[in-house]
Image (cartoon, rainbow, N blue to C red):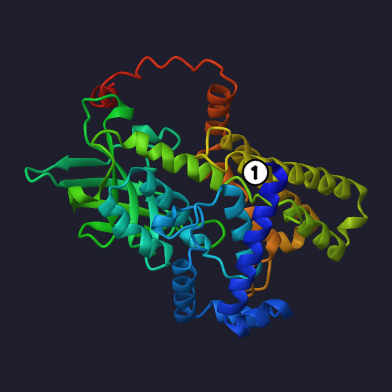
């Protein structure tokens, strides 16, 4: 397919979606968006019953999961078409929320690649329709950047099922999720990457205790999750025993691509900075104008690189090159948050009690998020050096050492 043919296909799909939305999105919802009535729109989208009904309609029609195979309710779309669909849904405030990122962006693709037919039938339809929320149970207090060093233990019972004990941390929305993507160690005699198994954990199982963690922003999206002798059926195992690292790579690649910015060239975070600078008078400073311009150029370059990557990868899974965009996006987000405090320094450090937190404060406090989530910037640099540039890996004398011996060492 030529570039022109692909563009025509994307445009045709967006037109089809707009026609579908005109006939299915509630009229008062459409009117609120057209009128720019944020208050009315907030009231509509704050109604759980309306959201649930809408997500059911959206998912049943396939628009929530366009990249999925048609067999499972999708359109077999490439990443470029799916991105255009998400952008149009976001324009109408009709897309799935960030809280569903793990399920849609990470869980769905991983289950599609590694799941049995029974697992796909059980998990994919309710995920597409917004009926079940998912969280990610990967990181641990002693296994963050070195994820393969995780020590949560899964011991197999005589009947083939599992007993899981351990602790996870930084699990977004775990306190309100029905299922979790869980990695646990099932063979401590094997090297660390080869003794891990991947599970689809029912978060309502006895022994699962999520505890929200208060963040700098004042929100409590993250959780630490305690697993105390949790009974997990073997039917919840995703992929082969002790091959969980291979399964997890599917999840991690999807996560890095999903956290690398939107594949749309146009107004972004730096445009909001420029507007705010005009409102506060900071635009009169040539130094601040130059800083905004520099970040704007970098943001547009990232947008174009993301669009190009999505078009080129429309027929395959995300690869290591996603680490480049994820790295740039994370560091750009951090710099934008910092610059925002220069535009309105007073608003960034104080506000009226009970009032909404200023945008500058939120961006600054959350600025490090994308430098950490989905693999730190340092880890992304390692991936880029080794898998993109082909540089030699650092020697690891313990790479093939049994995990149990490594722990004692």
User: Would residue 181 be seen by someone viewing this image from the given angle?
Assistant: yes
- Is 253 left or right of 127, judged from the image as shown? right
Q: Is the residue 4 above or below the residue 350 in the image?
A: above
Residue plotted at (51% across, 39% down): 316
State the image coordinates of residue 382 (x, y, percent, origin top left). 54, 26
State the image coordinates of residue 290 (x, y, percent, origin top left). 87, 45
Of residues 289 and 266, the one nearer the viewer is: 266
Of residues 136 and 76, the one nearer the viewer is: 76
- Is 87 left or right of 200, judged from the image as shown? right
Which quarter of the figure has residue 128?
bottom left
State the image coordinates of residue 384 (x, y, percent, origin top left). 57, 28
Which quarter of the figure has residue 145?
top left
Q: Is the residue 406 above or below the residue 319 in the image?
A: above
User: Would residue 366 be seen by someone viewing this image from the given angle?
Assistant: no
Looking at the image, the residue that sits furthest to the bottom is 28
Which residue has dot 1 on it?
329
State the image coordinates of residue 239 (x, y, percent, origin top left). 28, 40
Q: Is the residue 109 above or below the residue 191 in the image?
A: below
- Is 326 left or right of 102, judged from the image as shown? right
Quadrant where the image shows the N terminus: top right
Quick one: SS at disc 1?
Answer: helix
Quadrant where the image shows the C terminus: top left
Residue plotted at (78% across, 45% down): 295
């Amino acid at each position: 397919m030529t570039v022109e043919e692909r563009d025509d296909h994307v445009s045709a799909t967006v037109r089809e979606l707009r026609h579908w939305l005109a006939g299915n999105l509630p009229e008062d919802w459409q009117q609120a968006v057209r009128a720019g009535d944020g208050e009315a729109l907030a009231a509509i989208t704050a109604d759980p019953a309306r959201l649930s009904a809408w997500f059911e309609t959206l998912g049943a029609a396939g628009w929530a999961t366009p990249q999925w195979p048609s067999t499972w309710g999708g359109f077999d779309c490439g990443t470029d078409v799916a991105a255009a669909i998400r952008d149009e849904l976001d324009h109408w405030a009709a897309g799935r929320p960030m809280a569903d990122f793990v399920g849609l962006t990470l869980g769905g693709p991983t289950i599609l690649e590694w799941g049995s037919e029974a697992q796909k039938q059980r998990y994919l339809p309710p995920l597409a329709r917004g009926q079940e929320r998912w969280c990610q149970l990967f990181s641990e207090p002693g296994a963050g950047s070195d994820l393969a060093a995780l020590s949560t233990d899964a011991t197999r019972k005589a009947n083939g099922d599992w007993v899981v004990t351990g602790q996870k941390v930084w699990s977004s929305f775990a306190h309100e999720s029905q299922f979790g993507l869980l990695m646990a160690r099932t063979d401590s005699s094997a090297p660390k990457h080869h003794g891990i198994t991947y599970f689809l954990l029912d978060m309502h199982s006895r022994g699962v205790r999520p505890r929200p963690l208060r963040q700098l922003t004042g929100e409590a999206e993250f959780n630490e999750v305690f697993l105390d002798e949790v009974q997990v059926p073997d039917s919840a195992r995703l992929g082969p025993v002790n091959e969980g690292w291979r399964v997890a790579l599917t999840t991690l690649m999807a996560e890095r691509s999903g956290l690398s910015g939107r594949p749309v060239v146009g107004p972004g975070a730096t445009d909001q900075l420029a507007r705010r600078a005009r409102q506060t008078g900071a635009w009169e400073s040539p130094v601040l104008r130059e800083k905004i311009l520099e970040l704007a150029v970098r943001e547009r370059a990232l947008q174009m690189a993301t669009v190009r990557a999505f078009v080129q990868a429309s027929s395959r899974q995300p690869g290591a090159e996603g680490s480049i965009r994820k790295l740039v996006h994370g560091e750009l987000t951090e710099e934008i948050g910092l610059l925002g405090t220069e535009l309105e320094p007073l608003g960034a450090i104080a506000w009226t009690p009970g009032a909404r937190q200023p945008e500058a404060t939120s961006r600054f406090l959350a600025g490090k998020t994308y430098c950490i989530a989905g693999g730190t910037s340092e880890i992304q640099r390692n991936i880029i050096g080794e898998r993109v540039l082909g540089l030699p890996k650092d020697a690891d004398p313990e790479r093939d050492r049994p995990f149990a011996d490594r722990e004692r060492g």
